Amino acid sequence: MKSTTTSFQLRLCLLFLLFLSGGTHCVLPAQELSNSVYATATEGDCCFQFDYTYNLPQGVTSIETKLIGTDITFSGIDYPLGSGWQQTVLQQQKRLRWTWQGGELPPGDQNLFQFCLAGWNTTDSISLAVVWRSGNNIVQRDTLQLACGTCWQAADYSFECLPDSSYRYLFTFVNNSPFTVDQIQVREPDGQDLVFEETLSLSGSLPPGHSQSGLALHFRADAASLEEICFSLSPKRYLETGIVVECCTATYCFPIPDCDHCCTAYEDFIIDTEQGFSLAIDCENTQIRLQANALNDCDQVVFTLTGLGAGTVDGNEAITFGGLAEDTEYEICMTATRRDRNGENCYETASLTTCETFYFDCDQCTNPDQINWEDSCPNFVNLVCGCDGMTYLNACAALSWSGIQEWTNGPCGDPPVDSIPLIAELNDDLQVQLSWTNPGMTDYRYFLVQRRVSNGPWLTLAEVSNATFAYLDTAPLLPNVVYRIVGVTWPGKVVISNLGVIGLVATQSPSDSNDGKVWPNPAGDYLNISLSLSQSIALQLWTSQGKLLLQFQTDHNGFFQLSTAHLPAGCYLLTSNIAGHSWRKRVVVIHS
């Protein structure tokens, strides 16, 4: 039974869709809350008794039943209800209505009617819609699944929570049918895609009356959003003619267990950490209050302030540091570790760190009440020097994102350079490929890609997200074009890369010219590597900081396709030793 409204939260209990030849007693889902409907099959045929329970005042005055979308019809209908009820045929042998002439339905248990089903020639279940009405208004809809006979059941079952937040259903399959079962088909309700398995294989053919233990179904972590999870199993048998026959189908629904969902996907932990932290200034007590923006009590957080030590709290707690000196710059770092409820680290790379520079000034330089990181400021680069001695993107960024009350035009001395290493390369199509990295893990809002020719003004080509580390200039103004990347932090401060200078001729090491090629470059989810050799060659992939990531072998034709989908966007170096000399190729990874 399944409710389509929020007025009644009807829970679907164990439901058997049973083998056609059967004749055993069949009880379809009973409702555990106040209002419910039942259908019970009688012995030896496809006849049912329909009962309902009504206890909560909902203004219900009538009940309708309708067979949905089949050629099957009611037959042998018996109406045991007494005086006070009016029965109306809305569609002959398909749709019936019962109205209580005294107003709202009387509370308690009632046997509405008894019926059989004519025209049944399938093992599929039949849907019987039940509509509760108040006058002409629908209060609730329910659906009963009707079937006859039984051919299998699950025993010794359990529902487990797995460390990656997914679920596993373990059970023993009992073959109650008169047929041998060779395989089990797995199905889900329409619109649901939570089960990893499409079929379950048995250790061998399962004769009637036998069982197999240790079967398992895995459900995705998205099931956590549901109150209960449903799936259907259909045992199959293989005939000598090659035809596969499904004996029957059974649908089970279970409430989702309360699991320890601390250990999310590692990518989610990165995103949560990169949301950074917020700070509140207490000038009266020379204190600062810090709290993570997107972490929770699954996370252990260590805040460190330059010269003031460190403190540890849960990810949803705040921490206060005192003794701050006026007109002093501090570096604040937040190191997060995600753990399960037992205190064990969730990932091999246990901790992530993000840092921010903060200038403590209570001499009317900043007004925390004016800080609103959601304010929209233009992305034009018109550097200003704030009264805190920091350089900001423009006046709007200084005021809205850091609460700066006074500033002067121009930077505070030279803006910080080289914290965003930039590489500019000219490709064979005379396009300039820019690639950069964020080795300091600074929490940026976005990056601005800028270009100038000779000593002309800087022109902003694009604003790219803080997760993008590459840009292709398809129409560079050659020669003597110069590039830079302006990183804009959440408080509006800027970090500027080194200059990327491009001339008319692209520089390329001799070993790159004829020994091999890589494509596409930049790479997305994969990178093709083709070396001009008829033998297998060992290759290495390095980060831009010189850390060895991967070692692998090409095939005997010198070809290899490298998956880069799991690599962070950025610059990498591909190296090998070919015929006694070093071969290397710089590659860029981007993800759309």
Image (spheres, grey):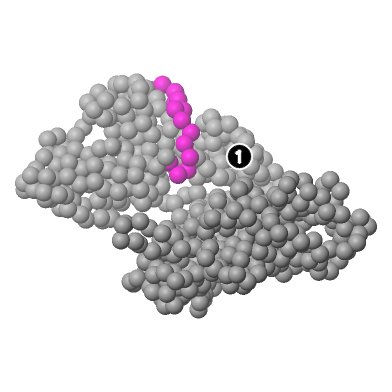
Q: In which quarter of the view is residue 432 placed?
A: top left
Judge from the rendering whether residue 506 lies leftward or rightward of residue 342; answer left or right. left
Residue shown at 52% from the left, 59% from the top:
123
Residue 377, percent across and down? 60, 34
Residue 53, percent across and down? 79, 66
Judge from the rendering whether residue 164 lies leftward or rightward of residue 95; answer left or right. left
Q: Is residue 461 magenta?
A: yes
Judge from the rendering whether residue 173 lies leftward or rightward of residue 230; answer left or right. left
User: Does 392 appear above or below 320?
Assistant: above
**Quadrant where the C terminus lies?**
top left
Among all residues in the image, which is located at the extreme left? 579
User: Does 468 appear above or below 23?
Assistant: above
Q: Residues within 10 Å of mark 1 (few under 14, many from 20)?
A: many
The residue closer to the viewer here, 474 or 496, is: 474
The three-letter amino acid code for the residue at tag 1 is Ala
Q: Is residue 264 magenta?
A: no
User: Does 302 appear above or below 562?
Assistant: below
Residue 494, percent across and down? 50, 40
Residue shown at 51% from the left, 77% from the top:
155
| Element class at badge 1 | helix
Specify start and end residues of the magenta stretch as a single range. Answer: 455-468
Q: Is residue 294 visible?
A: no
**Quadrant where the N terminus lies?**
bottom right
User: Does 70 appear above or below 173?
Assistant: above
